Image (cartoon, rainbow, N blue to C red):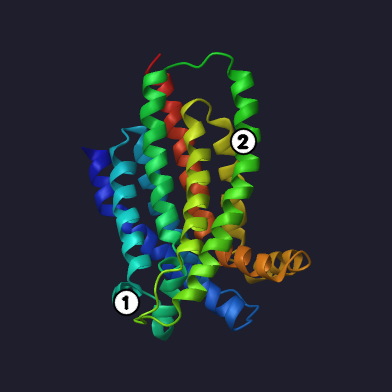
Amino acid sequence: MVSSLIGLIITVPALFFVISGGGRSYSQTLVQARTESDLGAILLALAGLVLFVVVVLSGLLSAAGQLIGGIIVTVTGAAFVIDPGVASWVSQFVPGFGRAAPATLGLWAQSGLLLVVGVVLLASALARVIAARSGAARSRGARALVSIIVAVVATAGGLALVSVGSTALQRAAGSYGGSQSIDVGSLLILLAGSVVLGGVVLTSAWSSVGSMIIGTLILLVGVAGLLPVVLIGISRSLGQVSTDVAIGASTLVAIGFAAVLGVAMIGAAASSARARRAAR
């Protein structure tokens, strides 16, 4: 019951705070090329991340919180992708966006990133259920090694697909309220990336090591990326590989998506580990 209420009540405000703070950080660092930190934006994003930690750790009680939160975010994310005008309307009620509200929320909404977060939360709930039924794992060392390898390789691939798909969807969407049709190819790329990332989270059902390690690394990068000097460094470093890669990756970090993904992975790992111990 408590877990369900947490997922129902806290999920949306948590993401709204992250979107608001991350959006301001993105706008000032990558769009306006400012190098000074916006303390208000950072605190707003961190407050959202703390609330999101509560949501994902509700899995320590049951999978209901992650499940309900995942359903809410998935349905909302799908609605944003289908109808860009929905994001334009919702942006009026999100704190801290200012004049750039439609464009900023679009980085999460029409680009499909909210949909990705929803899929990851649903995978976290499923991992928790499977872990509770599987009980203590045998050959834990081998499973841990496999989970680390899968987490590193699959997460890199999943993030690449999400970056490419979300960037293409955002470009195809154009201005809010337009009549342009959905870029099906880009949407399929995004969905493939979300499934891969969901698969990484799902490995927590058998071993939490991989998700915990990769989630922690992504979270650290995501939080550090709220600082302009770090974000600019990431963008310049990746720019030597590809301009599109630099734009996509730095955007995922700047708007708070990377930090949210890291928190979700850590929560899934902790919840599944708790479920396995309880099932012994």
Identify the element where label 1 is drawn: helix
Q: Is residue 58 left or right of residue 235?
A: left
Which numbered marker is on residue 85? 1
- On the image, the x and y values in percent for residue 225 come to 61, 63
For the C terminus, the quadrant is top left
Q: Is residue 239 above or below residue 161?
A: below
For the point 27% across and 40% down, which residue is it? 3
Q: Are marks 2 and 1 in contact (CB under 8 Å)?
A: no
**Quick one: label 2, few (<14), some, or many (20+) residues within 10 Å?**
some
Q: Is residue 28 above or below residue 261?
A: below
Q: Amino acid at mark 2?
A: Val
Q: Residue furthest bottom?
A: 99
- On the image, the x and y values in percent for residue 47 come to 42, 59
Q: Is residue 193 left or right of residue 86?
A: right
Name the residue tied to disc 2.
150
For the N terminus, the quadrant is top left
- On the image, the x and y values in percent for residue 185 come to 50, 62
Q: Nearer the viewer, residue 31 or 228?
A: 31
- On the image, the x and y values in percent for residue 73 come to 34, 55
Q: Is residue 250 above or below residue 125?
A: below
- Between the C-alphas of marks 2 and 1, the distance is 38 Å
Q: Amino acid at mark 1?
A: Gly
Q: Is residue 154 left or right of residue 83?
A: right
For the point 56% across and 51% down, which residue is it? 219
